[in-house]
Image: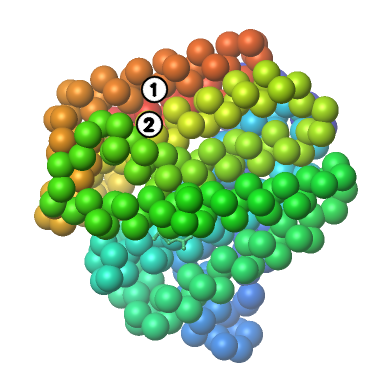
Amino acid sequence: MNDALPGQFKDRITSLTAHVNTRLDALLPLASVRPMRLHDAMRYAVLTGGKRVRPLLVYATGECLDVDTDLLDAPAVAIELIHAFSLVHDDLPAMDDDDLRRGKPTVHKQYDEATAILAADALQPLAFSVLANLEGAPAGAVIKLVRLITEACGSIGMTGGQSIDLAAEGEALSAEELETMYSLKTGALIHAAIVSACLLRDDLPADDAASLDRFARDIGVAFQIRDDILDVEGKTEIIGKPTGSDESLNKATYPAMFGIDASRRRCDELLNEALDSLKHFGNAAAPLEWLARYIVKRGQ
Ligand code: GRG
C-alpha cells in the first residue's frame, strides 16, 4: 500500500519515473534479439527521454484512491507504450513530418520510415499484452482496462482526434470544435491514465469516479493548449522539438485561433475547474493537484 504522504509526491517523481523506466526497459525486447533493428527502434522510441506524465497520473490517482501500487504498473506502462507509439506516427512525413523529438532525431530519421512504422505497430500490441498479463486485479478489471484503453486510442479517441487535426489544417475552428479535437487527440489517453486507476478499485463510490472523470477531461484539454503555447513560445532545448511547427503546418491551434493570452486564460480556467473536482478528496489528491499545476505551467 501507499505509505508515503501525498504531499511528498513531487519529491518522489524521480523515483517513480525511474521505476516506470525500469519496467519499460524490462518489457521491451532486447536490441540483441532478432529482428534487431526493429527492437532497437522500439527501445529508442520508448526509452529516449519523455516526461512520463501519463504513468505519473496513473500513480497519483492510485495514491488518491489508495490502490495497491503493484496493480498500477500495468496501466502505467501500457499507456506510456501507446503514447510512445502515437508520437512515432505523429512525427512521420505523412503526419507532422518532424525531425526532432525529445531533443533527439525522430525514429524515422534515426532509422528509416518503414522501421518507424513497424516499431510503432509493435508497441501497440505490447501494451495490450501487459494489460492481459495483469494479475491480482479486482474481478473484471482487466477487461474494463482493455475497453477503456482501446476506446481511448481508437477512432473515437486519439486516432480520431489526429484525423480531425490533420483535416483542420488551414481551417478556422471554433473554441468548442478545437476543444473537442483536443479532448480526443491528447485528452483521451490522459483521461484513460486517470480512469485506469479508478477501475482498479471495485468499490469506488460513483461520485468519486465522476469527480476524477471531470478532472481528467479538463486536464487533458489543458495539456494540449499548454503544448500549443510551448510550440509558439517555448525553447527547443527545453521542449526537445523545434518551435513554430504548428504555424508552419498551418495547424488549427488555440493560440492560432484566439491568441496566446486567451490560451493562457483558458488553461487557467481548466486548471481551476480540474482542481475544484479534486476538492472532496482532501489531502489525498495532493499528488494529482501537483501534476495538474505542472501540466498547465510546464516549460515556463
Ligand atoms: C493509431 C493510437 C494511434 C495513433 C495514431 C498519430 C496519432 C494517431 C495520434 C497522435 C496524437 C498525438 C501525438 C497527440 C499529441 C499529444 C502530445 C501533446 C504529446 C506530447 O506529450 P508529452 O509532452 O511528451 O507528454 P513526452 O515526450 O514528455 O512523452
Q: Earlier in the sequence, mark 2 or mark 1?
A: 2
Q: Which residue is mark 2?
A: 222
Label 2 lies in ligand 1 vicinity (Cβ under 8 Å): no
Residue at 85% over, 42% down: 138
- SS at mark 1 in the image: helix
- Kindly tell me whether mark 1's CB lies below 8 Å from ligand 1: no
Does 74 sit left or right of 263 as displayed? right
Label 2 CA crowd tier, 10 Å (few <14, some 14–19, many 20+): many
Kind of residue at disc 2 = Ala
Kindly identify the residue that appears in the image at 47 percent across and 56 percent down: 155
Q: Quadrant of residue 286?
A: top right
Q: Where residue 21 appears, x then y in whole percent?
A: 60, 54
Give the answer, above or below, for where 206 lies relative to 230.
above
Position in image of residue 269 (x %, y %): 35, 18
* The N terminus, quarter of image: top right
198 or 100, which lies in front? 198
Q: Residue at x 78, y 33 (%)?
A: 201
The residue that appears at 30% across and 47% down in the rendered structure is: 239
Q: Is residue 107 above or below residue 241?
A: below
- Cβ atoms at labels 2 and 1 below 8 Å apart: yes
Q: Which mark is residue 270?
A: 1
Quarter holding the C terminus is: top left
Q: Residues within 10 Å of mark 1 (few under 14, many from 20)?
A: many
The image quadrant of residue 127 is bottom right
Is residue 26 in view from this perspective?
A: no
